[in-house]
Every structure is written in C-alpha cells, then in structure tokens.
C-alpha cells in the first residue's frame, strides 16, 4: 500500500522536539551508547524530496541530506524500485563467494564516471572510512613505501588509520589512541584564513612534505574539505599538488566521499580544476543511503594489491549496488549536476546579500549544493562557534535541519538534497536569516 505523498512544505505540528520524539530520546539514552550523538533531538518517521517528517508529524526542511548522502533525494523513486527488485531476487551471497553482476556494473560505472580516460579498476566497500583505508593499502602495495600525507582540517573517518589521517582531536580522536603510524600532516590552502594564492600554498605544503617526510606512498586530500569547514582551496593548489605527486611517483588520492556524485556541481569535485587523481574514494552520495563505498583508480595501481588482499563480507552488497546504479541513472536522467549548480547560484546569491548586511558572516563559500558560511566576531576573523550553535538551534526549533562543521565549530553548512524545491530552499534561508538577525 502506497503512503500518501509527503507534502513539500515546512510544517510544525508540535514544539520541537515533540512528545513522541522526547519519549524515544529517553529510550535512546538508556539503550544506545552515549558516544553516538545526534544533531537534532527528533526521530524520523519518513522522508522524501526536500523534507523529513518526524514522529510527531512535524515536517522539517532538509539541509543536511543525512550528511551529504541522499543527494538524489531520500528514497528516490528509481532507487526504491531497484532495491525492492534486488531484495526479492537475493539480499546477499558475498561477492567473494558467488559474485553477481550488480557489483561489476557499479565498478564499470565508476570507471566511466571518475575523472580521466585511462584504464581503471574499482573495488567496493561499506563505509567511507573503510574505502580510505583501502586506498592507503593499495598505494602502499604499489609504491612499497609506508608514509601517508594528510592535511590540516582533514576528515577521513573514525577507524584507527582514518582517525590518524583526521586532523581534529575532539570529538574524533580524543582518548582513542594510539593511532596508526607513518601519517604526516601538511598545511592546507584556506583562502579565508591565509593570504597565500594556490601555487604558493602548494609550495608550502610540498616543502613540508619534502622536508618532513621525503617521498610518501600517498597524499590523501579532500578536494573540498567537508567536516573541516567546507574549505575550497585557492585555485591552483590542487593541480600543483597533483603535479608534484606525478613527478615524484606518489599516489594522489582524492577523498571524494563528501564531494562526489554531483554534490558540488560536477560529478567529482576534482573536475573543477581539471585534476585527475590516481585514486578516487567515493561513498556518501553513491547509493542514496545504502551503505556503499569504493576506490577507483589507475589499473596498474589498483592491481598492485594481490588477489585476496582486498574485500570484505559485505563490500558491494547487492542491495547497495542496485541502489548505486539507480542513483547514477537518476543523476544522469534528471541532469542533477546542473541542478547542483542552480542551487549554488540561489544559495550564494542570498547568502552574499546577507553578508553585506551582517559582518558576522565572515565568508560564504563552497560549490554546488555544498555551501557554507563561516561565522566570526564582527569586523574580525575570530571564529564564533557560539553564534553558529545559536543559529543552528534556532533553525532546528523552527523546522530546518542544518549542520555545523569546521575545526573551530563556527561554520554553518548546507547540503540540501538536489531534489529540494527552490521554495523550500528560500524558506530555509529565511529561517536562518531570522535566527541570525535576532541573535545579538
Ligand atoms: C564522511 C567522510 C568519511 C567517512 O565516511 P564514513 O562512511 O562515515 O566512514 C571520509 N571522508 C570524508 C571526506 C567524509 O566526508
């Protein structure tokens, strides 16, 4: 039986959180480990398009996409249909036991869609962190070298190796060490907070790598940083770094877990500057919420790992593969790369006009449907995390799901699903502005 269509408009039926959510939150506190936090104290009942309906009947505007995952829209129709059909055929056989076509088809699509026309191979996993770890394994197998370079403000996940690659201590690493060895950190290009152009920032990073590491196996970088604050490096930074990697036979790994799959107004964010990574890591937006991740890259690098060296029980689960194929079809048929660019224009236009009226908006940045504002104390670039917290809390209370990020916690980030309507976006931005302007 089909549920009635979910209205695409913000609606508050109760206060936030409502009574059902408060009950469930009390159960959560007794049943779920404290380490798993939640952005909002409301429980979801259903979701679709650009909204999430909670268990009290409140309809919230979704500016988070479950952290950049449901890019094509939560429960996108093609995905629902494909997953249903696959579930009826088989839910699991393990690709390493009796393989199935869906896995191969996803690998073919990734090889086709990722930057560069060279021969490629792909391998599938469950989570972003797992894929980043495997990219490092592959780079080490190929180069025979141990060292890996990551950057300031980087976020690569919560497993032991990816905690080591991640920059921020609290909450991701604090108390969880010791961390994996042979991980080194280089300075990023952060245009709002340094005055280096892209090539100069790249020289600074390369100098650090050459002096402190020598020749690593891999340089791992997010083309636009996600959790670190939606930091878009200055033009020329990524190409110079990729060029240095090529010249030194260092594997250039683009962690496109958050930026991939149309999110930034290109299928992969590396494309904005014509960068062709040796390995691309995908996850989040790849399968509309089913757990799937991948490493895709140059055939000779990917095939350096011996047979049996890569894999996992669930990696490339058939339901997730069916979802990924339907997600890719949806992106292409509905021209969602272009839709992400439209969303960028709409959001940046509004946010830049707000910035003229309010000097606490220090920076407006991002690409596509991955846009952020960095909040500062008036007339300075001192981070104002308390303000970001207050504005997001005000938005939550009025039915807008919005996330914060950044090393200093002072960045409001917007990751709407590409299925969201302009009206919902405008309404959400009105709510945010009211929250900001009412807070002195
Ligand atoms: C979310 C994220 C990860 C980790 O992905 P999980 O699926 O949570 O393990 C890695 N890299 C980046 C850039 C991310 O945004």
Image (tube, grey):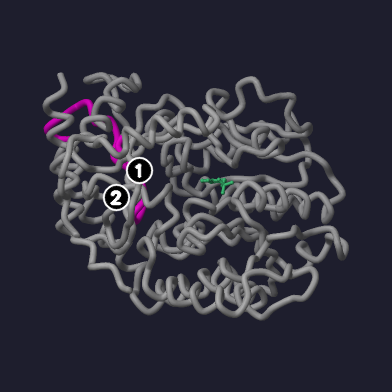
- Considering only vertical position in the picture, is 349 above or below 383? below
Circle 1 residue: 43
| Left or right: 300, with 133 as reference point | right
Circle 2 residue: 62
Q: Residues within 10 Å of mark 2 (few under 14, many from 20)?
A: many
SS at mark 1 in the image: loop
| Left or right: 231, with 280 as reference point | left
Tell me the CA gap for discs 2 and 1: 14 Å
Sequence-first disc among 2 and 1: 1
The residue depicted at 11 percent of the width and 26 percent of the height is: 438
Q: Which quadrant is the N terminus positioned in?
A: bottom left
Q: How crowded is mark 1: few (under 14 residues within 10 Å), some or many (20 or more)?
A: many
Q: Is residue 358 magenta?
A: yes
**Residue 381 or residue 332, whichever sits in front:** 332
| Left or right: 215, with 67 as reference point | right
- Considering only vertical position in the picture, is 117 above or below 142? below
Q: Which quadrant is the C terminus positioned in?
A: top left
């Amino acid at each position: 039986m089909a549920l009635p269509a979910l209205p695409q408009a913000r609606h508050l039926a109760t206060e936030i959180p409502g009574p059902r959510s408060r009950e469930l939150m009390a159960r959560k506190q007794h049943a779920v480990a404290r380490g798993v936090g939640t952005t909002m104290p409301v429980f979801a009942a259903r979701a679709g398009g650009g909204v999430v309906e909670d268990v009290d009947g409140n309809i919230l505007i979704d500016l988070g996409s479950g952290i950049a995952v449901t890019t094509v829209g939560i429960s996108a129709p093609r995905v629902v249909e494909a997953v249903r059909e696959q579930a009826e055929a088989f839910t699991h056989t393990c690709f390493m036991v009796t393989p199935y076509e869906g896995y191969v088809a996803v690998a073919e699509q990734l090889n086709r869609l990722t930057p560069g026309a060279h021969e490629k191979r792909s391998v599938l996993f469950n989570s972003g962190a797992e894929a980043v770890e495997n990219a490092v394994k592959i780079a080490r197998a190929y180069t025979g070298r141990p060292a890996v370079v990551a950057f300031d403000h980087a976020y690569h996940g919560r497993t032991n190796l990816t905690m080591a690659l991640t920059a921020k201590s609290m909450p991701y690493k604090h108390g969880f060490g010791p961390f994996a060895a042979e991980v080194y950190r280089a300075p990023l290009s952060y245009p709002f907070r340094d005055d280096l152009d892209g090539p100069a920032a790249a020289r600074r990073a390369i100098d650090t790598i050459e002096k402190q590491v020598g020749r690593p196996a891999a340089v791992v970088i997010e083309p636009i940083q996600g959790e670190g604050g939606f930091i878009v490096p200055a033009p020329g930074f990524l190409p110079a770094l990729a060029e240095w990697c090529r010249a030194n036979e260092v594997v250039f790994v683009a962690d496109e877990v958050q930026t991939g799959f149309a999110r930034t107004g290109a299928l992969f964010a590396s494309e904005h500057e014509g960068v062709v990574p040796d390995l691309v890591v995908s996850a989040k937006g790849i399968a509309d919420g089913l757990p799937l991740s991948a490493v895709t890259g140059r055939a000779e690098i990917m095939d350096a790992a011996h047979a049996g060296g890569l894999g996992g029980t669930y990696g490339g689960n058939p339901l997730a593969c069916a979802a990924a194929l339907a997600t890719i079809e949806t992106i292409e048929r509905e021209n969602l790369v272009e839709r992400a660019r439209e969303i960028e224009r709409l959001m940046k236009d509004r946010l830049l006009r707000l910035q003229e009226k309010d000097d606490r908006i220090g920076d407006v940045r991002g690409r596509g449907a991955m846009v952020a504002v960095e909040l500062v104390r008036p007339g300075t670039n001192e981070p104002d995390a308390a303000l970001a917290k207050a504005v997001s809390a005000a938005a939550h209370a009025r039915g807008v799901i919005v996330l914060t990020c950044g090393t200093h916690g002072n960045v409001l980030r917007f990751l709407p699903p590409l299925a969201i309507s302009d009206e919902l976006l405008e309404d959400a931005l009105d709510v945010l502005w009211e929250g900001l302007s009412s807070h002195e």
